Image (cartoon, grey):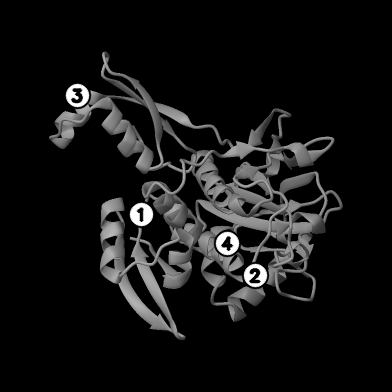
Amino acid sequence: MPVVSLDRDHLFGGLEKKYTQEEFEQLCFDYGVELDDVLEEDGRTVYKIDIPANRYDLLCYEGIVRALRVFLGKDPVPEYTVDNSAAGGGLQEMRVTDAVAGVRPVVVCAVLRNLSFDERSYQSFIDLQDKLHHNICRRRTLVSIGTHDLDAVKGPFVYDARAPEDIRFVPLSKENEVNARELFDNIRSNDIHLKPYLHIIENEPKYPVITDSSGTVLSLPPIINGNISRITLNTKNVFIEVTAMDQTKAHIVLNTVAIMFSQYCKNPLSVEEVKIVAADGSSSTSPVLESRECVTNLSAINKLLGLQLSLAEVQKLLMRMGLKSHGDEEKEEVVVAVPPTRSDILH
């Protein structure tokens, strides 16, 4: 199972309560996660928490604290909203060419507006992407994430595939411009972190690339971003692009990153949509933040659990787990609203 490492005092600050280790172990058990280890690092206590492999919403401090606060009754179930008020004359656009169809066909995007990072939240933002890349993204083979300072580039953006010699840019944390072929040669010789990902596209005749309206390269997915759009502590508007082989997984990953860190926006828990224009001219918007409804039966719940819960009791327990619901006592029907962060619920 994935393990999330959290500074104990920072975690307790988010929960607005100090726990003994035994008390916190019990809280984890009650919720359905496990305190796996406790370490002392650089004068601070670090809790290592085991997370179920399909609970992508718990892979960061923000998700764990949000879930536990709802479980403890400190916060209501969060409502995630679309806020396009800052888009002005129109949404940001990602225009997809037909050249990507054979290499990495899917792209979805979102914008986080008026966001405020500090050292902790910035590092958590990076760590979540890394954990997703090693989990649902299957080491970037299925999905990869690019995050950019929107104020450093200008849309509309283009998702294309080009011969590696025709892709020239300054890679992240570098100073000199290279083409993609030169970049791969350099990574192969000098970068043990990125080298394992080269095989994903290096044998393709064309590499996927994302550019802005001036042709500036933002990203060479799934390998590396361009240096021009790098995120810093001063970044206020974040452009998120997720490229993938699978539409469903792309939306799961986009929703996870955007929703977890939307709490730091001026309008908390809000995300701005991006218009995705396909090669055939059709269009859609992402992210998709609507809840989906799952219908179940009260008798079936009680039979499965060996309990005799009333509808009100079931609804209260669902609420503690971050799930709103309504129902009909006579029909024994329970309708559960599953938020966009809970792809683990497959009913």
Q: Nearer the viewer, residue 330 or 92?
A: 330
Q: Earlier in the sequence, mark 1 or mark 3?
A: 1
Amino acid type, mark 2: Phe
Whether label 1 touches label 3, CB < 8 Å: no
Q: Quadrant of the C terminus?
A: top left
Alpha-carbon distance for marks 1 and 2?
32 Å
State whether residue 120 appears in this view. Answer: yes
**Tag 3: amino acid:** Ser
Q: Nearer the viewer, mark 3 or mark 4?
A: 3
Report the residue that reaches farthest toward the right: 214
**In the image, which is nearer the foreground, mark 1 or mark 3?**
3
Query: For residue 296, what is the image quadrant?
Result: top left
The disc, 1 or 2, on the residue closer to the chain's N-terminal end is 1
Q: Nearer the viewer, residue 211 or 302?
A: 302
The percent position of residue 259, horizontal first and vertical second, equals 56, 47
Q: CA distance from mark 1 to mark 3?
A: 29 Å
Q: Categorize mark 4 by other alpha carbons within 10 Å: few (<14), some (14-19), many (20+).
A: many
Relative to residue 247, is residue 187 depicted above or below?
Answer: below
Q: Which mark is residue 299?
A: 3
Residue that numbered label 1 is attached to: 53
Give the CA distance from mark 3 to mark 4.
42 Å
Q: Secondary structure at mark 1?
A: loop
Relative to the observer, which residue lies in front, 5 or 281? 5
- For label 3, the crowd category at 10 Å Cα-Cα, with few meaning under 14, some 14 to 19 and many 20 or more, is some
At x 66% / y 57%, what residue is drawn?
A: 147
